[in-house]
Amino acid sequence: MSERPVRVLLLEGNPADARNVRKLLWEAPSDSFQVVWLDRLGAGLRHLQDTGADVVLLDFSLADSSGFDTFAAVRVRTPDAPIVVLAAAEEEELAVRAVREGADDYLLKRQLNGAALVRTVQGAIDRSHASTGRGAGAPGKQPGTVLGFAGVKGGIGVTTLALNVAAALTRSHGRVIAIEFEPGCAGFALQLRKAPGIEAGNLLSLDAIRIDRRELKSSLVELPFGLRVLFGPAGAPEGGTIRPEQAEALFQAARHLADYVVVDLPPLSSAAARIVAPHCNQVVLIVDPEVACVAASAMAAELLRSWTKGQSELRAVIVNRTPLVSLVSRNDIRSQVKSEILGLIPHDMELCASPCQAGVPFVISRPDSLTANALVELADRLILHPRPAGVAVL
């Protein structure tokens, strides 16, 4: 099966059933299994987040959870690892429902034997590898990287830069999803000259437990050059803004559907920004070198650091939209924002307006322009020199 032990997370509420499953796996003649048994859903979800598993064997009845909700909670937290349900005879209808909703298979406990258990676990893992394009036994695919873009000055070009970086990454670095969250913000639709039709509001009207890869995938709009987009809600979602548990579920799904997720963050004054920003590996905050904007950017940088609890590294890129006024020097910007500066993006008003006319990011429609080349280089820097969980200032 694999040169390393298969990591099995056994979530089983009955100690006798847990002993039997572990015994059957440990006695398997040709395969090596590393079994972790937990009897609580909360502990199991923490284990999946911290350690992961190659396969989950799941009992519906745990010490702190029972019924179909147990499966649904595990499915949200582990969208890639296959789940095999271990069901009592009276739970077979629930087990069939779980398979329809994303479980890989189920086994009835009363019929359990070593050969059937090993065969089912092997088949679940093989199918999971095939569906994600991995060879059997290959290490699990790393979740995608989330890059957030933000600004403190209206009209500075956050949406333009986010879409162009996303387009540049799509062209040369793999699968990319671009997401916006702000209710009523038509930034992506305006730039791409599209009526969204399906947008984030559909997802944000759902309970977190229902936000998974399938729901997210059905809400994405794929553009001709390969970028997939989740347009911002047309109106305020039910509840007023994205809730923390919805954000966690949405980003879990997005990281498994894409190599890079580019987020056009809501205004930093909004509750949504505070909820979404901590999920970004890097947050790109755009800085205009004008005096007041630099001061505001310095405050925004501290705000972002507090939201991400120091897990993110602040980085900076400068976009100069005010060439006729007295500008703050690059060294002074670095000092005030307390960040590495990745570079300077030249601003071309005519070029930046072109997407609104053509409906295509200018790194695609005008790839030879100076600004387009600078943004392609920025995308490369963000990927070639990643930070652990970062805030990038643009």
Image (tube, grey):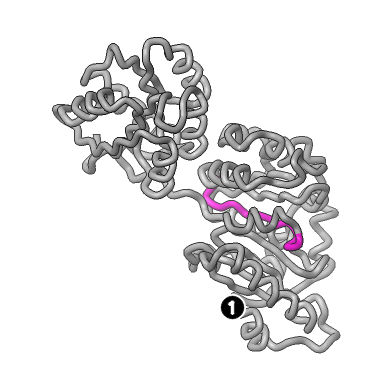
* Image quadrant in which the N terminus is located: top left
Is residue 370 in view? Answer: no
Location of the C terminus by quadrant is bottom right
Q: Residue at x 46, y 38 (%)?
A: 78
Q: How many numbered marks are there?
A: 1
Q: Is residue 282 above or below residue 225?
A: below
370 falls in the magenta region? no
Residue drawn at (69%, 65%), measured in percent from left and top?
372
x, y percent for residue 4: 23, 43
Within 10 Å of disc 1 (Cα), the crowding (few <14, some 14-19, many 20+) is some
Q: Nearer the viewer, residue 235 or 376?
A: 235
Q: Quadrant of residue 160?
A: bottom right
According to the image, label 1 marks what residue?
Answer: 339
Identify which residue, 329 or 210, lies in the foreground: 210
> Is 259 one of the magenta-colored residues?
yes
Q: Percent position (x, y) of residue 19? A: 23, 27
Instruction: Please identify the quarter of the rendering in which residue 40 is found.
Output: top left
**Residue 275 appears at what percent x and percent y?**
65, 54
Instruction: Specify whether 193 is left or right of 367.
Output: right
- Vertical relation: 331 (above or below) 113: below
Amino acid type of the residue tagged 1 in the rendering? Ser
Q: Callout 1: helix, strand or loop? A: loop
Q: Farthest residue toward the front?
A: 63
Can residue 389 be spotted in the picture? yes
The range drawn in magenta is 258-269
| On screen, residue 393 above or below 357 | below
In front of the other: 280 or 237 = 237
The answer to which image quadrant residue 346 occupies is: bottom right
